[in-house]
Structures are given as structure tokens and as C-alpha cells.
Image (spheres, rainbow, N blue to C red):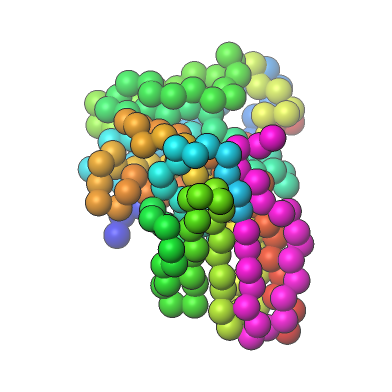
Amino acid sequence: QKEVEQNSGPLSVPEGAIASLNCTYSDRGSQSFFWYRQYSGKSPELIMSIYSNGDKEDGRFTAQLNKASQYVSLLIRDSQPSDSATYLCAVISRYSSASKIIFGSGTRLSIRP
Amino acid sequence: AAGVIQSPRHLIKEKRETATLKCYPIPRHDTVYWYQQGPGQDPQFLISFYEKMQSDKGSIPDRFSAQQFSDYHSELNMSSLELGDSALYFCASSQWGASSGNTIYFGEGSWLTVV
């Protein structure tokens, strides 16, 4: 079992709809959770970070964290074609000095016009 | 704002040659990470440094070595290159204990092609 699991997709969503991306993690001690967007051949770009249970909103993006269920999600409202990319869920497994970040395999999102 | 700088952006080497990638972290960031991403794969953690000391090691081959220098820049040295080493290599940096929660920022990556 991978430490961070994502549905690889592709997830196809019509333009203007809500895209919902899900991620589960295995380490209950995980403290920090991130969503990165990666276009093909480009570096991951930080979209959202979340550290406590509940929702965190930033523009069209909402991150949701449920530590009891070891689940983190990303909602994208009013999806745009430019949102088409691979979305990587990332987790810092231990809040120790210089922890490494563990990535999921990514979910490919395709926004159809 | 300054970002993570990597060089070179593209590199072509032959099998069994040596390659060196450089990374300049965001100013005041004390931690550097190296990742390897093959085509269609998620980034794989190679190695990290905190305050110029190796802090964690992932799936880095013995043919590879890395270090962080006094100015916090880091270099990844790859020897006896193999075709399978062709990948996008990312450097990332973070500031331990920052209010941003140890958020990691990535450089643009260095494309290595081994022929």
C-alpha cells in the first residue's frame, strides 16, 4: 500500500462544474497536507496547504481535511480549461526537522469545454 | 519573489558519463530536496539536506551523490549514467519551522537525457 493514494484518473469534468479530487494517506501522524498542480513537463506548483481538520478556501479552490478518516480533498469550483493538469496530493509524514514530503501518484484532470 | 533556481535546464549526456545538477534555494530556506520524475510518474524523493547536512535519503542510486554548500546551494552528481536516469530532476526548498508550515517550493527542474 502506498503511503499516499490518489485515483489516477483521468477525471473529466465539464467547464464550469465542480471538480473533486481525493487523497488518502496511511500515516496517522501526518501533520501537513498539500495540493500541487503540475502541467506536463513543468514543475509542481503549490495550490493549497492545509494543516487542521475542516475546510480551507482560496478563490475557486477548497481543501478539506479529515484526519480521523485520513482523507484530504481538493474542490475546484467553476472549472476552467486551464485547470486541466495533474494534481498531486502531498503529505509530510512527520513534523520533524527536515521531513520529506511524500507524493501521491497524481490525478489527471481534464476540463472539457 | 525569488524562487528556486536550477541549472542547467536541459542536459544531454551519453551512457557512462557524469552529470552535475545545481540548485539554488529560496533565500533564507535552510532545507533542500532532490526529486526525480520519470515520464508519466510521480516525483520520487532522492535526498534532502538541512543546514548543510544530509537529513534524509530516499531512492537515490549509489552512483549518485549530493551535497549542500555553505551558501545553501546544492549539487547532485550523477556518475556512470544509464539510459534509465533520463528524467526530470526537481530541486525544492523549504524553511524549517516557518509559519508557512514547512511548505516546499519547487524549481523549474532540469531535464536530463541520457543517450
Q: Position of residue A109 (x, y in %)?
A: 69, 66
Residue A98 higher or lower than B101, as above or below: above
Instruction: Name the residue at 69% across, 43% down.
Output: B41
Extreme residue toward the front, this view: A68
Residue at the location (48% across, 70% down)? A62
Query: Between residues A102 and B28, which one lies in front from this camera angle?
Result: A102
The quadrant of the rendering that contains the C terminus of chain A is: bottom right
**Span shown in magenta:** A1-22
| Residue depicted at 76% across the width and 62% down the height | A10
Quarter assignment of residue B33: top left
Is B35 placed above or below B64 here? below
Q: Is residue A103 left or right of residue B53?
A: right
Q: Position of residue A97 (x, y in %)?
A: 32, 30
The structure residue drawn at horizontal position 29% and vertical position 32%, both measured from the top left corner, is B72
**Is residue B7 found left or right of B41 in the rendered image?**
left
Q: Position of residue A76 (x, y in %)?
A: 56, 73
Coordinates of residue A94 in the picture (x, y in percent): 41, 34
Can residue B54 be seen by looking at this rendering?
A: yes
One can see residue B36 in this view? no
Is residue B101 left or right of A58 when viewed as pictured? left
Residue B98 within the magenta-colored segment of the rendering: no
User: Is A20 contained in the magenta span?
Assistant: yes
Q: Quadrant of the N terminus of chain A?
A: top right
Foreground pick, B56 / A27: A27
